[in-house]
Image: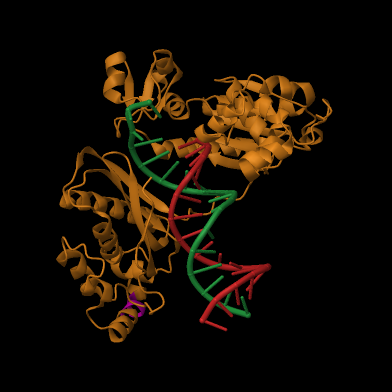
Chain colours: A orange, B green, C red
Amino acid sequence: MSFLNPQSWPRAILHFDGDAFFTSVEQAVHPTLKGRPVVTGKERGIIACASYEAKALGISRGLALHEARRQCPQLVVLPSDYETYSLYSKRMFHIARRYTPMVEEYSIDEGFADLTGLRRVFHASYEEIARRIQSEIQAELDITVSIGLSLSKSLAKLASKYRKPKGFTAIQGGAAIGEFLRQIPLEKVWGFGPNTVGLLTKHGLATAADFIGRPEAWAERLLGKVGRELWGELRGESLYPVSTEEKPPSCTISKCKTFTAVSSDPEFIWAKLVRNVESALIKARRHHLMAGGAAVMLRRADYRQSGLETRLSRATSASHEILPVVRLLFQELMETGAAYRSTMVILCRLVPETSLQYELFEDPVRAHRLETLNLAVDAINSRYGKHTLSLATGLFLGHHGKTDRDDQPIRKTRLLPGETARQRLKTPRLFLPV
DNA sequence: TCTGGGGTCCTAGGACCC
DNA sequence: TCTGGGGTCCTAGGACCC
């Protein structure tokens, strides 16, 4: 094993991480909140982010609000304001992009930048460039970030978390890496979750240094591809590139909601599921996406989960088209008498909206498209019959309580216009209960 | 964490074809 | 009809992330 020459920066990867991002933005926008214990998450009753002042009083993320208020009566509780957080996020990434276009927006409050090769351009060391980015963010946005600078994304991310808030940690080459990783317990490593940590602990490992001290082949044998890659990343080999690609609109949209109390009432549970479907569809339409498949998951009182998934005969974002399908899945899944605590719907196989269905049913009709739309309606009606849509809706309304998978009216119904025999709704498949 | 909500990636194994 | 090998596609589910 040969660590890299201490003076060389084969790669200079920066990770910047907003300190208590949501509450910091709130304090920047409302300076009177500075120095006070602030939390966000009012709308959900659970703390989404706690300012450092709140953390100092023992308030942490995930805590129930009533509990937090009891502990700390002077707590300032705010609803999440994602619009503003996104705006600050954009500004933060914009500042990083003054130095390089190689910036990855990893999440709303953290990102990577590949600074490799910029020393000459800015007549500055990588540390100086990183510090400039850090101080410009603070000066212009009035929020702080913690910085990690190292040879790979995994190391940079560990470094930025090492000192917070407003931290600056650079780990370059050789002995520095080994020394640093000796202080890092396995569970801090990006990519080691509870299961992996458990496995590694069984093999006698405790720190990230222990991990990279094992042979590469050992890491790969035990943990597969991810294990080999992390092994290299932690030794300073940059294997995960900083990706500037805009995240393609996600392939799934899911909505889940936990009931305030568990329920075994099918009508109640169905109503909750319908709400999930509607909000998932609203999101889909906002992103101009249509779902080509749908899945339903129910979580039982004992937290076991089961679900069913199906493809749609064609993509849609119309609730009157999706709900009958979801109803089928729900009926198949719901066990009479069993108690449930949450429902989830997943819209999958999302594709860009082709606009016809959406325009037709959801939008105010625009005059210049009227003719096109009418033609389309005529075409659908003449091809599939005027009951095409009412069949689906009636199905949803009229078969309450039916749970037979071979339910004839359901199986035979042409759920969506445009379906062929091959595309017909497949028999739902069971997800294994967890 | 006694369990919130929204995602991504990887892999084993089955289906299907030649 | 059975057997075998090999390739590809798809899916379910695990694990992990913020």
Image location of residue A62, percent across then percent down: 37, 28
- In the displayed structure, A264 sits above or below A423; it is above
- Residue A30 located left or right of residue A261: right
Image location of residue A193, percent across then percent down: 52, 34
- Residue A254 located left or right of residue A243: left
Q: In this picture, which residue range is highlighted in magenta?
A: A370-374
* Residue A98 visible (yes or no): no
Q: In which quarter of the image is residue A224?
A: top right
- In the displayed structure, A308 sits above or below A369; it is above
- In the displayed structure, A373 sits above or below A264; it is below
- In the displayed structure, A371 sits above or below A202; it is below
Image location of residue B12, percent across then percent down: 56, 53
Image location of residue A49, percent across then percent down: 41, 27
- Residue A366 located left or right of residue A202: left
Q: In which quarter of the image is residue A179?
A: top right
**Residue A214 or residue A109, whichever sits in front:** A214
Could you tell me how many numbered marks the image carries? 0
Quadrant of the snapshot with the N terminus of chain A: top right
* Residue A308 visible (yes or no): yes
Secondary structure mostly taken by the magenta-highlighted segment of the chain = helix
Residue at the image position 66 percent from the left and 22 percent from the top: A169
Quadrant of the snapshot with the C terminus of chain A: top left
Residue at the image position 45 percent from the left and 18 percent from the top: A52
**Residue A394 or residue A340, whichever sits in front:** A340
Residue at the image position 57 percent from the left and 20 percent from the top: A166
Q: Is residue A65 magenta?
A: no
